[in-house]
Image: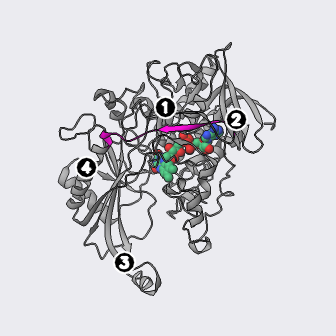
Amino acid sequence: MPPQATSFDAIVVGSGISGGWAAKELCEKGLKTLVLERGRNVVHLKDYPTMNLNPWELPHRGAVSRQVLKENPLISKAAGYGEDTMHFFIKDRDHPYVQEKPFDWIRGYQVGGKSIIWGRACQRWSKHEFVTPEKLGYGMNWPIGYEDVAPWYSHVEKFIGVCGNADHLEAMPDGEFLPPFEFNCVEKHLKDSLLKRYGNRHVVQGRWAHLSQPKEIHLQQGRGTCQARNLCMRGCPFGGYFSSNASTLPWAAKTGNLTIRPDSVVHSIIYDEAKGKATGVRVIDAHTHAITEYQSRIVFVNASALNTNLILLNSTSSRFPHGLGNDSGLLGKYICHHNYRTGASGRLDGFEDKYYYIRNPTECILVNFRNLGKQDADADFVGGYTTFTGGYRERGETQVERVGGVYKESLTKPGPWGIYMYMQGETIPRETNTVSLHPTQKDQWGIPLLVTSVGYDDNSERMIRDWQKQAKEMLAVAGCRDVEVRDNNWAPGLDIHEMGGARMGNDPKKSLLNKWNQLHACQNVFVTDGACMTSTGNQSPSILYMTLTARAVDHAAQEMARQNL
Ligand SMILES: Cc1cc2nc3c(=O)[nH]c(=O)nc-3n(C[C@H](O)[C@H](O)[C@H](O)COP(=O)(O)OP(=O)(O)OC[C@H]3O[C@@H](n4cnc5c(N)ncnc54)[C@H](O)[C@@H]3O)c2cc1C
């Protein structure tokens, strides 16, 4: 496309996990597609400056300097933030927001978004997760069910590459898997102990977006086998894990239909009252602050859940004075997230004659066994939880100070085995958990600051207590000693899976989006990132965003062909 072109078939806002998928699918369908990304360009391989560095080649051996910590007290709390990865996270001072209640908002603004730094866990939702909130009275039904998304899960899994084992479990349906990474001896022991003791508690191999054994479709993307270096968040020189940069964006570019414009901060979506639909997007250049308007027949909003809410709220017109499509007044409400507040660990005697010889970039999953499709009689909370777990062997004496000759000497001997666990719990979408626009404060581009008012509730506290009780018991069942359980007491936000605000539903009075992720009141605008989530489920969400995106693009293309959009 000539650089000055402003008219396209489709515009995608955001180039992260969901935006990359929108771009791929739209371009493959022959639609001229513009991807607008607020951050800088990050080209696969070329822009991964630390991908091949050894610790001693980093100025602080990978540790974050005091200066960086002082300047970035918030973002430096993010999982995986380090000297080797911090260039893929925002800087606190550049992107302020207003925390009405404490909320640590973790962001990565660049081409590829958070797909470079995500954890890569990719489980499917069970059929129960779509319906249990309404059935048990703590939420609303989705307008779709598992059977609607199952073929699209397959579509996505085949392309991104997900390793895992077919375990035939109701709580976590199987997908199109590449071979799993192996359990180590302690993980196998944990799996066997829990199954023997409980019968319904399954520890399975990680379902992770890694190419354990690439297929032709992955080689065509220029990606290769995961080397289990466990340096993923630096960007992978092998394309061993899925990111937009390694996969969907270059694939979309190959069609010749993609224009990607980094450094383009989307201000709002333009609504034409006479036509009764959106006609394009208003963009502010990140550096010059020049404003450009781009036109298209359809718009996909994939700026990540909270930024998508911000853009929709900021897209006002006389038809939509409170934000695009916001006839229900619910835009920005029912914000929810996962509950990551608690973890546990213990030491395990035995297995001293065993070790493991490769790294494993995945974690084991202890599949949800709580409130599965019904309320457990002994549970004083609603919702389920997934537990991530793993067995590891420490290096050296654990009591030795981590410096000097004695420490070095101790490293020559393997230390004790341990097992860790942590929870990823469902939360209840509540109308009172909101994001909104600040009436006066603006960012450097003149866009209102986002106000977050999101908190944990009593149900989350009760779930944490239940999980801790169960984890303590399960670690004991596995034979662990020195068992510790923790509540990190952190604010929401660090839980990284923010969702909601523009939820899907059949009833326009109770939701913003229909079953195809179109705004009920402005059908040529699609929202397929976390903002669309009607409830949180207990599985890692991003593969569902990719799935819903591919499904929505297919619908959009059909409607465009019928001249309905
Ligand atoms: C450390 C970490 C680990 C995680 N692990 C997992 C995991 O294991 N499994 C899982 O399912 N999920 C995981 N997640 C969550 C996952 O990263 C997100 O769910 C996912 O990236 C969301 O995709 P997205 O496309 O909505 O947003 P993003 O990937 O964040 O992309 C959004 C893009 O939109 C751009 N943008 C924002 N506002 C604008 C604007 N106004 N104009 C133009 N562009 C804009 C951003 O710069 C960004 O590039 C993890 C997240 C983190 C931080």
Q: From the viewer's perspective, is residue 450 above or below residue 217?
A: above
User: 10 Å neighbourhood of mark 4: few (<14), some, or many (≥20)?
Assistant: some
Q: As shown in the figure, which amino acid type bears the numbered disc 2?
A: Leu
Circles 3, 2 touching at the beta carbon (< 8 Å): no
Label 1 residue SS: strand
Does label 1 or label 4 sit earlier along the sequence? Answer: 4
User: Mark 1 against mark 3, which lies toward the viewer?
Assistant: 1
First reached walking from the N terminus: tag 1 or tag 2: 2
Which residue corresponds to mark 4? 201
Q: Secondary structure at mark 4?
A: loop
At label 2, counting other C-alpha atoms closer than 10 Å, the crowd grade (few under 14, some 14-19, many 20 or more) is many
Image side of residue 146 versus residue 531, left or right: left
Q: Ligand 1: does it lie within 8 Å of the C-beta at label 3?
A: no
Q: Where does the image place residue 402, in percent across and percent down from the top left?
A: 43, 78
> Residue 499, relative to residue 418: is it above or below?
above
Q: Position of residue 542 (x, y in %)?
A: 48, 42
Amino acid type indicated by mark 1 = Gly
Report whether residue 151 is seen.
yes
Q: Which residue is mark 1?
A: 501
Q: Residue 34: which disc?
A: 2
Q: Which residue is mark 3?
A: 414
Q: Mark 1 or 2, which is nearer the eye?
A: 1
Residue 279, horizontal then vertical, whole percent: 69, 23
The furthest residue to the front: 440
Q: Which residues are magenta?
A: 445-460
Whereabouts is ligand 1, in terms of quadrant? top right
Q: Residue at x 66, y 42 (%)?
A: 38
Amino acid at the residue labelled 3: Pro
